[in-house]
Image (cartoon, rainbow, N blue to C red):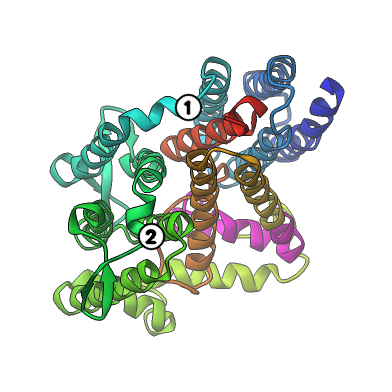
Amino acid sequence: MFKKNCLLLLPSMAILFLGTAVIELGKYPVINFSLWSYILAIAVGAFCIAGILQRTASDADPYIFPIAMFLGSIGLIMIERLKAALFIPQIHWILIGMTVFFGIVYFTKNIRFLVNYQYLIGLCCLLLLSSTFFIGTEIGGSRNWIVLGPFQVQPSEFAKIFIIVFLSAYLIDHKNVLSLPSNKFLGFRWPPLRFIAPLLLIWGIAVLMFVVQKDLGSALLFFGIAIFMTYMATGNKTYVFMALFFFIISSIISYQLFGHVRVRVAIWLHPWSDPNGMAYQVVQSLFAFGSGGIWGTGFSHGYPGLIPEVHTDFIFSAIAEELGLLGDVPVILVYVLLIYRGIRISLQCKNEMNVLLAAGLSISLALQVFIILAGVTTLLPLTGITLPFISYGGSSMLSSFIILGLLFILSKKENSNA
């Protein structure tokens, strides 16, 4: 089995070594030993983690870690191609993420204790989200960052994990009450206000994130997580209709009151009306997809650098331009495989909270991938969130590895049967 785990890591390591070699040999006549030492550290670390976990958690899902490393390798070579100065920092974040992942799965035997701290976890989530209202810094048009010296932290990346854990515990604890709404209001049957209040609070926070922080991506992500998890826990479609009604009304009011909301909608609906101004990013992204076509322009032979912030929000557009549809589809399929493994872990759990937690973590990854891909192709308004494991960013990388670690723990037989 150890050999199997190593074999699963080979494709990602091969892509990382070969992709970096193609780029480096094209730029430098000599070998950059410092850079290759970092790449070797990732390979050695990945194989060591796979080997140790095989001995200590042989019954856990063996695929999710190699899948994440495959996506991380794709991200690294694209960042080296697009913004070489950020290549080493991204390697640092992947190494830190791998360490966090290993620490979570090695030292955490069971996560059932989280149910006893659900309200504390919910409070931590509120504190993380509200922190940017007071000490946040606007970067890239969104006020969802906290700058700490040389570091930039995006609290919403970690808050989404707290929300998933909180909802998993809260919805299961109050499942019976939430499944049988009794009070009729505005044509819907509602449960008592004290039980629905946390859900209304999350919906309200999502709207505030959109309006005040100008962070549409995180707002859609939080809103979607709350809707999916509530429906999965209760099986009651009323909450879906209530949430959509709440979202539509809030969107209409926001559109009427706030200019930046109208700008986002205008860019989405009519990107070609201002191709060299506000819609420049979106238009260049569409050009990248068109230039790539089916076969792509060839790795390192395109012009994705014309897209501002291509290494973060628009890294999938760069893949589309240089690797074409033949490069895009495998990346999407790998994400589908990761989400499938997460849902499979959820279905194997016997404890209701673990079922909902694993499903919520998987849904969060699925929504994040969908939202960013829809944004760069104008299916949805431009959102400004990252592509998990691929886009540049420390907060995103760490939160993605934390999600991976929690899914790995839930896949262990002792937890799936708990």
Q: Is residue 417 magenta?
A: no
Mark closest to the chain's N terminus, 2 or 1: 1
Q: Is residue 314 visible?
A: no
Image coordinates of residue 399 in percent, x first then y, are 45, 36
Magenta range is: 304-330
Considering only vertical position in the picture, is 172 above or below 330?
above
- Identify which residue is drawn at 66% across, 33% down: 65
Magenta: main secondary structure equals helix
Q: Residue at x 72, y 64 (%)?
A: 324
Q: Secondary structure at mark 2?
A: helix
Discs 2/1, front: 2
What's the distance in space between the residues labelled 2 and 1, CA to CA?
Answer: 25 Å
Residue 47 appears left or right of 140: right
Residue receiving disc 1: 111
Q: Amino acid at mark 2?
A: Ser
What residue did someone put label 2 on?
Answer: 179
Circle 1 crowding by C-alpha within 10 Å: few under 14, some 14–19, many from 20:
few
- Is 239 displayed left or right of 69 in the figure? left
Q: Secondary structure at mark 1?
A: loop
Residue 167 position within the rendered picture, expressed as x and y whole percent measured from the top left: 37, 46
At label 1, the amino acid type is: Ile
Q: Nearer the viewer, residue 177 or 314?
A: 177
Membership of 316 in magenta stretch: yes
Image location of residue 248, percent across then percent down: 29, 76
